[in-house]
Amino acid sequence: MKAGDTVITFNYDRVLNLLNEHLVGLSETRSLLRSPVGCPSFDEKREGVIPVYHLHGHVGWQVSADGNHCEPDGPNGIRADRARAHLNPAKALMGTPGKAKTSLHTGALKDCWQRAMGAIRDATSIVFVGYRFPETDNLAKLQLADALRQNPEARVHVVLGANNADTPRLAGMIGWTRTGSGERGPTLIHEMLCQDFFAVFERREL
């Protein structure tokens, strides 16, 4: 990854936080991956920073009292990139199955969703890694499809593992978004595990 990239995830675990700590330790830089939630002045284009959008929230995020945004840090001093959902489950900002999940894109994570969909609309290459457009999450499916439809020239890569039963339906859905005037971007299916893809891909081929 490098500046200019964007990471969009539906996971609310700390995997990317741990990765960031590892990358920072290797590069001796302050931050490589950063989430803009709770940071209105966040600049996605700042050199050396890769924006990360957790569209279903995060184990470290808590909703504000008015329910309209995320509190970046808690009164107990625990940073928002640390797990704290267990400390106050009622305030946890995570898209677990149910009504709360379907309202995130218009509520506390509205800005996050808007920025993420904007990144898809502006991208030259889009890579779906391990994400299969699950049947139970129609909201995300519709939002992603709409953003893809507005960017028909982008190259789209799909990495779901070898012989994954969901690959044809995902390729079919993405294919329907590759319409419009002008040149259409291809949908490229890579029959390999996610870790295999990251081991062999080269940026110039994206």
Image (tube, rainbow, N blue to C red):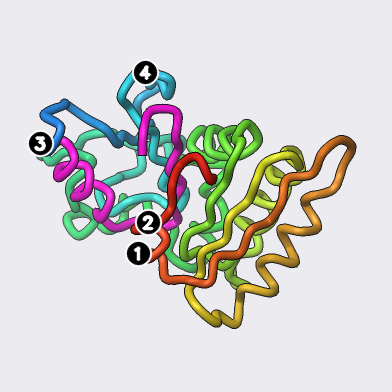
Residue beneath disc 3: 77
Query: At which x and y percent is residue 141?
Result: 65, 59
> Which quarter of the rendered picture does the C terminus lie within?
top right
- Labels 1 and 3: the sequence-earlier one: 3
24 magenta-colored: yes
The quadrant of the picture occupied by the N terminus is: top left
175 vs 144, nearest the viewer? 175
Graded by Cα atoms within 10 Å as few (under 14), some (14 to 19) or many (20 or more), the crowding at tag 4 reads few
Q: Is residue 7 left or right of residue 87?
A: right
Q: Which mark is residue 181?
A: none
Residues marked 2 and 1 touching at CB (< 8 Å)? yes
Mark 4–mark 1 distance (CA, rounded to whole Å) = 28 Å
Which residue type carries mark 2? Phe
In what element is the residue under mark 4? loop
Where residue 124 sits, quadrant-wise, is top right
Q: Are marks 2 and 3 in contact (CB under 8 Å)?
A: no
Q: Judge whether residue 92 is colored magenta.
A: no
Kindly identify which numbered label has been placed on residue 198: 2
Query: Which residue is drawn at the image coordinates 34% and 56% (left, top)?
Result: 12
